[in-house]
């Protein structure tokens, strides 16, 4: 009764240039922690093997340090690991995998599936049929050869591949690399472990994408998980259990503010997010000066509490109310300037006008408070 952990798309060596340096470094570190988590889960669930369905590395040019750290992170599980090259780390004539071998960084219990074929584990009665990518893009189904691979009769047949199940996934996945939607049935596989789609996704009763163990994109596709798969005997349907591996939760919010209750709702939602959040927030619509002050204060608190907060308010217009303007004591010329800036927020220089209005309001409020003291 083989039991194994299915994972993929580690993308080790990935960088996060759009984030602040501190946040980017933490997100990189989380990917190494994810491998340690996978090792721990494989041990706790008494798995017979860990199968990694491609894109272990994000690029062929990752540093030697990244290579060594990756393999060091597998130490928590002493059973066999099978690692398959994907489109980001294809098994080229000269590749990151060759370099790992020259560095003597690959532990004895890690099997690199650099060529098509079968890796068998006699003690576990498990046969892993491997279809590694030997170039970044292919236009033929490399898993078609699984039907020609012979395995012992008493062994469970598990396919390991990286690519796109045709006709079932969106067009914006990483590469072409087609895989027939009936591959598990056509090649008499008990299970087909796939990588390339970065979220957990079931294709049929024997075919799954595990997704990446640590999210790295703002996409709601069930990322941050791995699969524990148990197959009682050859021909039996697999039992698949999802396990959480992610440290950080990624959220992408697109909010339109029109009335005060919209802002109230947004601020309440911000408070409910856990500290381990990476939030991409884009706001549009309009907000009063008083609302802007509340929003700034809430975002300042959130920036300190979350792992990362990316905020885009370029499409959010300031719409001072009569009460706002009265509170600023902006009569005469200053009142006219405020009105002009309000109107200019609809033109080509809308973002400049918005920022200028916010700065002017801040200065006037500070002066008003000083006068009151």
Image (cartoon, grey):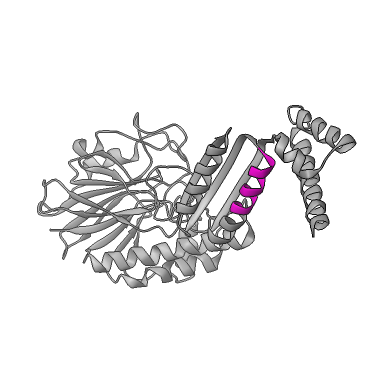
**Image point (44%, 70%), residue name:** 105
Q: Is residue 15 visible?
A: no
Quarter of the figure with the C terminus: bottom right
Q: List x then y, in percent, for residue 166.
A: 35, 31
Where residue 352 appears, as percent x and y from the top left, is 78, 38
Kindly identify the residue that appears in the image at 66 percent across and 44 percent down. Answer: 290
Q: Which of the two residues, 101 or 349, is positioned nearer the viewer here?
A: 349
278 or 18: nearer the viewer: 278
- Measured from the top left, where is residue 140 in percent x and y? 38, 34
Q: Nearer the viewer, residue 149 or 300?
A: 300
In the displayed structure image, the side of residue 275 where residue 36 appears, left or right:
left
Does residue 144 belong to the magenta stretch? no
In this rendering, would 277 be left or right of 2? right
Query: Where's the N terminus, which quadrant?
Result: bottom left
Q: Which residues are magenta?
A: 288-299
Answer yes or no: is residue 306 visible: yes
Is 289 one of the magenta-colored residues? yes
Q: From the viewer's perspective, is 190 left or right of 8?
A: left
Q: Position of residue 349 (x, y in %)?
A: 78, 32
- The total of numbered circles placed on residues is 0
Q: Main secondary structure of the magenta part?
A: helix
Q: Which residue corresponds to the image point at 63% horizontal and 60% vertical from the top-left?
A: 21
Specify whether 164 is left or right of 135: left
Question: Which residue reaches farthest front?
Answer: 372
Residue 108, image quadrant: bottom left
Q: Quadrant of residue 154?
A: bottom left
């Amino acid at each position: 009764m083989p039991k194994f952990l299915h994972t993929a798309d580690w993308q080790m060596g990935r960088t996060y240039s759009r984030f602040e340096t501190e946040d980017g470094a933490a997100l990189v570190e989380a990917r190494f922690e994810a491998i340690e988590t996978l090792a721990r889960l494989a041990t706790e669930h008494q798995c017979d093997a860990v199968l990694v369905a491609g894109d272990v590395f994000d690029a062929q040019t990752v540093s030697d340090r990244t290579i060594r750290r990756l393999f060091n992170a597998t130490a928590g599980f002493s059973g066999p690991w099978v690692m398959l090259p994907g489109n980001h780390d294809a098994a080229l004539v000269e590749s990151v995998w060759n370099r790992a071998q020259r560095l003597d960084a690959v532990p004895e219990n890690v099997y690199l599936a650099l060529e098509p074929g079968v890796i068998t584990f006699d003690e576990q009665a498990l046969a892993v049929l491997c279809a590694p990518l030997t170039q970044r893009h292919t236009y033929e189904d490399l898993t078609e050869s699984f039907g020609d691979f012979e395995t012992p009769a008493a062994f469970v047949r598990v396919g390991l591949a990286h690519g796109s199940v045709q006709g079932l996934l969106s067009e914006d996945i990483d590469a072409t690399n087609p895989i027939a939607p009936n591959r598990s049935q056509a090649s008499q596989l008990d299970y087909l472990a796939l990588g390339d789609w970065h979220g957990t996704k079931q294709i049929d009763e024997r075919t799954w994408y595990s997704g990446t163990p640590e999210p790295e994109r703002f996409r709601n596709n069930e990322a941050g998980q791995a699969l524990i798969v148990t197959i009682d005997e050859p021909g039996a349907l697999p039992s698949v259990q999802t396990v959480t591996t992610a440290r950080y939760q990624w959220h992408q919010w697109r909010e339109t503010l029109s009335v005060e209750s919209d802002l109230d709702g947004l601020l309440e939602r911000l408070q409910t997010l856990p500290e381990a959040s990476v939030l991409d927030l884009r706001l549009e619509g309009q907000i009063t000066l008083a609302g802007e002050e509340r929003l700034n204060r809430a975002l300042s608190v959130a920036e300190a509490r979350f792992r990362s907060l990316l905020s885009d308010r370029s499409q959010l217009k300031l719409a001072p109310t009569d009460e706002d303007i009265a509170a600023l004591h902006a009569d005469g010329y200053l009142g006219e300037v405020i009105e002009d800036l309000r109107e200019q927020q609809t033109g080509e220089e809308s973002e400049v006008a918005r920022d200028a209005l916010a700065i002017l309001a801040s200065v006037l409020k500070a002066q008003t408070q000083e006068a009151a003291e």
